[in-house]
Amino acid sequence: MKTRVVFMGTPDFAVPALSALLASTGVHSTERTSTDAVFEVVGVVTQPDRGSGRGRKLTPPPIKVLAQAHGIPLFQPETLRAPEAWDAIALLAPDFLVVVAYGELLSPRYLALPTIAPINVHASLLPKFRGAAPIHWSIARGEAETGVSIMRMDRGLDSGPVYRMASMVIEANDTAGSLHDRLSTLGARLLVETLPLIASGALVPSEQDHSKATLAPMLKKSDGFLRFDQAAERVSQHARGMTPWPGVTCLFKEKRLKLLEVSLAARMGGLGDPGQILAVDERGLVIACKAGAVAAAALQLEGKSRQSAADFGRGYDPVGAHLQTIESSPPEMV
């Protein structure tokens, strides 16, 4: 008898997990043709199509595209609180609810619905970085490593007991974008390795140490307002953690300036005040911090297109000018 899985996910991060589940079943995959598959994805739940881009054209979530390509029953409720949402999902009689970045918390009755467990793939080493943006904040707060956790969901925010974890080093040049891609692949692999162990009863989850919990709140545009009154390493970490979204922004001559491809600059003598532009050279636009300096290889001034640091330097003669922090920037990290 096959184990019935309802998959709940929305963004790109969830795609490798659903793809791995489909490949492991042999039902929707061209890679395996066994009729003795243990798992069957009986339904997919994702967020409604949303407007995107300047024209706000309705765009389907990545998980919807994948589910439709495989002919899996698809549900896009505006909210899980709607009675019709509950009726549709309950009718599927899942053994597992597998949740990967769905975008809405599950109520107690959903958590009690699966006969085996409600499972979440979370992109951190719990209890660190519970919340909506663990990948971004793990870089921004200077962590040396992160990873993924396969967790049994409970009523709290990423507070349930953990079945398995896998760690990954955060590289010096990682951005939230590059780390996102590697973690999504790692999470998918760990998920398909772990589900059979849970289903067989061979794996019991361990409670988290709640005293060590840290939060990774949902990102706001203001989280990208860059400060230079801290060490260059901190500034670089924050910039990489906010890339590609919301990006990091400051003020140049009262106009917003987005700094792109920010990295630590090699040590140089005679550093100026925090935020002062020291040079435009092969490293990019070099900016003084409280200690050390960072360099932005490319920039985008408000109302203008992206350009290289060299082109920006020729157009605006910025050396000696000061970049200002936009109000409501994140507090200095200690």
Image: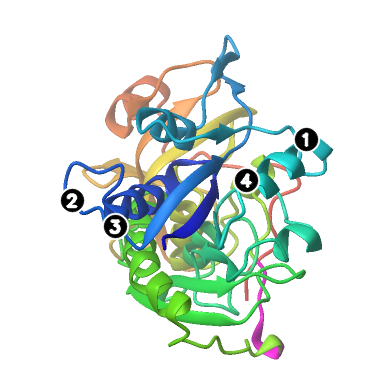
Residue of label 3: 24
- 90 sits to left or right of 262: right
State the CA–CA distance, disc 2 to disc 4: 48 Å
N-terminal of the pair, mark 4 or mark 3, is 3
83 to 100, vertically: above or below: above
State the CA–CA distance, disc 2 to disc 3: 8 Å
Q: Secondary structure at mark 3?
A: helix
Q: Secondary structure at mark 2?
A: loop
The amino acid sitting under disc 3 is Ser
State the CA–CA distance, disc 4 to disc 3: 43 Å
The amino acid sitting under disc 2 is Arg
305 to 128, vertically: above or below: above
The amino acid sitting under disc 4 is Phe
| Whole-percent x, y for residue 119 in the image | 56, 66
Residue of label 2: 32
Residue 67 drawn in magenta: no
What span is colored magenta in the figure? 211-215
Disc 1 packing (10 Å; few <14; some 14–19; many ≥20): few
